[in-house]
Image (cartoon, grey):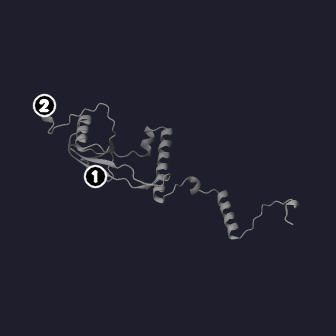
Amino acid sequence: MAAVAASKPFKTGLKQVFLPNHVITFCRPSRQATPPQFATFKVPLHFNKLDMRDYLLHAYSVATLGVRSAVMRQPIFRNPITRRVQRPPAIKYMTVELQKPFVWPKEPNKEERKQWHDEQTEKRVQLQEKQDQAMEKYQKHGRLQNDAVEKRSANRTQLAKQAKDLLSGAAKWDNRRDLDPKWTES
């Protein structure tokens, strides 16, 4: 008991959690200049600094020097159904200063990914990247864009040109059919 107390320079929490109902996400640093002694976690809003310190110590045996927390508000948006302005729940991030530095491994390139992923997984990764790009376009332009809108076929381009000519008066409408004489105006 004395050896355990000597190894922990601070009093740890007594809250025992057997089936946790919270999700803690270890986030990659958004900046390259982040020192390896700092690790960022996305945590629930009810999580506090002592909970985080105890969680890392008891679950992973990682000693920490300090914990900083920040609550980030989400941007407001207009609900398309109710047309009301809403704000999603805030997100809480905690930055932990570690005693031992942690360096993220470099991300694998396509050749290394092929060694670990089969063909189906690779298709899923490509589809996810395509959806991420579409979401970025949506956030940038404010409207959904799909392949049918972005890439026009030759028939669609020709139809658009004919419609433009009809509207401008450059062409006259003709359906290339002779009408029955009984339908002609007298």
Q: Position of residue 121 (x, y in %)?
A: 48, 39
Write the residue at 45% across / 38% down: 117
Q: Earlier in the sequence, mark 1 or mark 2?
A: 2
Quadrant in which residue 100 is drawn: top left
Front in this rendered view, residue 10 or 128: 10
179 sits left or right of 143 in the view = right
Q: Position of residue 35 (x, y in %)?
A: 25, 51
Write the residue at 15% across / 32% down: 4
Tag 2 secondary structure:
helix
Q: Which residue type does callout 1 highlight?
A: Thr
Tag 1 secondary structure:
loop
How many numbered discs? 2
Write the residue at 30% across / 48% down: 93
Residue 119 vertical placement versus 172 (above, below): above
Residue 81 vertical placement versus 162 (above, below): above
Task: Quote the CA–CA distance across marks 1 and 2.
Answer: 35 Å
Q: Which mark is residue 3?
A: 2
Q: Which residue is mark 1?
A: 34
Q: Position of residue 20 (x, y in %)?
A: 32, 34
